[in-house]
Amino acid sequence: MISRRTIRIKVMQTLYTLSTMDDMGAPDKRTASRILDEKLEHVLDIFTASVLFCIRTAEFAVTDADNQSSKYLKSNENHSISTKIATSELVTRVLVNKSFSDRLKKSKIEGYINEEEVKKVYVRLAKTPEYDAYCEAEASGLAEDKAIFRFLWEEVMLKNEDLTSHFADEFPGWEDDSEMVGMLMDNFLKAGAKMDFVNLLAVSKREYAHELLHTVIDKEAHCLELITPKLNNWDKERVALIDMILIRMGLCELLYFPSIPTKVTINEFIDIAKQYSTLQSGQFVNGVLDNLLKDMVKENRIHKEDKAAK
């Protein structure tokens, strides 16, 4: 579910955290692994909380219907509110998904849901023609449920500055993780809630994350020997810390991860540098990694798996 790009970003953030710690000497790999796991789980918690927020918004339709029924009962007026979304197939699937409830308990995610914010989002949703059309449709199924939940997430929630500010307050790093959460939400909606919320990160992806982290730590001295001559007139001490971390990560992927094509590695680290470092970082990281790759190809040090031969 989580992409390698997400993993690279979390490894980068872990290495940055380690570099700013006061401890002297080489980083403790056990500590590094713990920090990385915490960062990965944080993304998954934000995603699960986002799904829960959508579910609570849908369920608020019942509260709204009860309130309106009580209000109009006194005046003998007939005013019904649709509760269709609250009992939809998608909501039902999520609520009976044991892995979802297990993750809620494990990470205590319920505490992040603010009922007043849920009410505000429901009110916004209820005023839209898209929601009216969903409620008024005589027949609908999972496809229609997924469509209205996608509308709720993309058009009502993500475009609500007050709500995204609330998420930023509740979830440190929301600004960095929102794109990743959006990718997970897209997968969730496509899957129709058939998702293992406890094991959102595949074993192979977690192994890749820790292998990349440990390789960058173990090969630091060797990588710096290769990188330093490529900095030209730059003093390596003056190179942005994030840039140096990304170059080390990219170099390790080029040398020690035979299943990842060189072009994929370089393009990924260029994009991450553009997003997380300075305006010139993408070009800088590209130049250094490209020069390193040319030299290593000449020296026959790059050995990638031939997918066509498999």
Image (cartoon, rainbow, N blue to C red):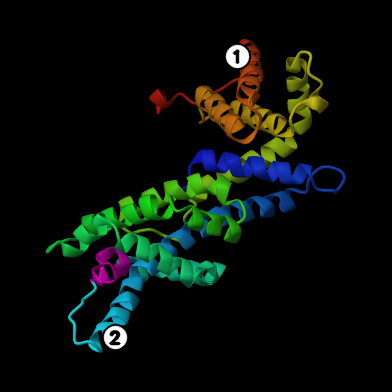
Whether residue 190 sits left or right of residue 167 in the image: it is left
Residue 94 location in percent, x, y? Answer: 35, 66
Residue matched to label 2: 70
Foreground label between 1 and 2: 2
Tell me where residue 90 sits by quadrant. bottom left
Residue 85 forms part of the magenta stretch? yes
Residue 75 location in percent, x, y? Answer: 23, 87
Residue matched to label 1: 297
Dot 1 or dot 2, earlier in sequence: 2
Whether residue 48 sits left or right of residue 243 in the image: it is left
Callout 1–callout 2 Cβ contact below 8 Å: no
Residue 49 location in percent, x, y? Answer: 48, 62
Residue nearest the viewer, comparing 179 with 255 = 179
Tell me where residue 101 sits by quadrant. bottom left
Residue 50 forms part of the magenta stretch? no
Identify the element where label 1 is drawn. Answer: helix
* Residue 285 seen in render: yes
In the current view of this chain or complex, which residue is farthest to the left? Answer: 138
- Count of numbered tags: 2
Tell me where residue 258 sits by quadrant. top right
Residue 218 drawn above or below residue 44 = above
Neighbour tally class for label 1: few under 14, some 14-19, many 20 plus, Cα within 10 Å: few
Determine the residue positioned at 66% across, 19% down.
288
CA gap between label 1 and label 2 equals 76 Å
Amino acid beneath label 2? Ser
Q: Which span is picked out in magenta?
A: 82-92
Q: Which quadrant does the C terminus fall into? A: top left
Report the predominant secondary structure element of the magenta stretch.
Answer: helix
In the current view of this chain or complex, which residue is farthest to the front? Answer: 75
